[in-house]
Image (spheres, rainbow, N blue to C red):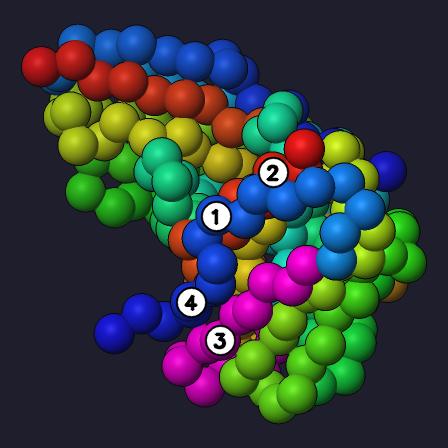
Amino acid sequence: DTAVSQTPKYLVTQMGNDKSIKCEQNLGHDTMYWYKQDSKKFLKIMFSYNNKELIINETVPNRFSPKSPDKAHLNLHINSLELGDSAVYFCASSQETSVWYTGELFFGEGSRLTVL
Amino acid sequence: EDQVTQSPEALRLQEGESSSLNCSYTVSGLRGLFWYRQDPGKGPEFLFTLYSAGEEKEKERLKATLTKKESFLHITAPKPEDSATYLCAVQSTQGGSEKLVFGKGTKLTVNP
């Protein structure tokens, strides 16, 4: 009974291809995120959605496009993949977006993307 | 820009050997400091939130403390199952953002 699930777990593809990663949460949370963990292990936020609306968009190339069909799903589509996109992408969700946000994020297990 | 620096990068302990991990931060108004645990091949798992200097939180063998410039995660009599990477993150009060800024983590290995 996974709380935040991502698919696929592993993705190996060629430069220039387009790929998607899907994320679903069954916690009833209203906010979902995409984080990127690069080879240096830094975990950096990419996007945040609250009730299907984009609320955080860090300086991410516009080749990355998040899509939230409903508040339980947040997908990440990546166009024209580059070598530097190789990383582990984590989906996460949280219960609230108020100023008293607790910092408790629920992460998925990650999707390891390798671009050859 | 908000920054989080964790030290050491890696720490090896014998079972039962207590130690501390450090997280120093630079942030424009601290809303909260958070500790997460990450096991290999898994997503980070939330441990603690600290809001103000002097605050402490405990969970089993872990105790997190906070000062105005840094946080410590004290591990008392660790067991091999405590082996993981421990991540520290901060959230600033600027802009009402829900963004967490993470450090690189400390990889802890506890040998039996």
Tell me the amino acid under the disc marked 1. Answer: Tyr
Q: Is residue A1 left or right of residue A46?
A: left
Q: Residue B50, percent across and down?
A: 50, 49
Q: Residue at x 64, y 44 (%)?
A: A13
Q: Quadrant of the N terminus of chain B?
A: top right
What residue did someone put label 3 on? A24
Q: Do residues under tags 4 and 3 come within 8 Å of each other at their CB atoms?
A: yes
Circle 1 sits on which residue? A10
Q: Residue A65, position in %: x, y?
A: 80, 66
In this rendering, do the residues under marks 3 and 2 share a single chain?
Answer: yes
Label 1: which secondary element: strand
Q: Residue at x 45, y 86 (%)?
A: A28
Q: Which residue is mark 2?
A: A114
Is A33 in front, or is B30? A33
Residue under pointer 4: A5
Of the two numbered discs 1 and 3 in the rendering, the one whose residue sits closer to the viewer: 1
- Report which quarter residue B37 is drawn in: top left
| Amino acid type, mark 2 | Thr
- How far across and down, in percent of the image, does residue A14 sit? 70, 41
SS category of the residue bearing label 4: strand
Label 4–label 1 contact, CB within 8 A: no
Mark 4 or mark 1, earlier in chain: 4
Q: Is residue A80 above or below residue B87?
A: below
Q: Earlier in the sequence, mark 1 or mark 2?
A: 1
Q: Which of marks 4 and 2 precedes in the sequence? A: 4
Q: Give the magenta-colored segment's residue range.
A: A19-32
- Are both tags, 1 and 3, on one chain? yes
Q: Answer whether labels 1 and 2 touch (C-beta < 8 Å).
A: yes
Q: Are marks 1 and 2 on the same chain?
A: yes
Q: Under tag 3, what secondary structure? A: strand
What is the x, y in percent for residue B4?
Answer: 67, 31
Is residue B78 within the magenta segment?
A: no
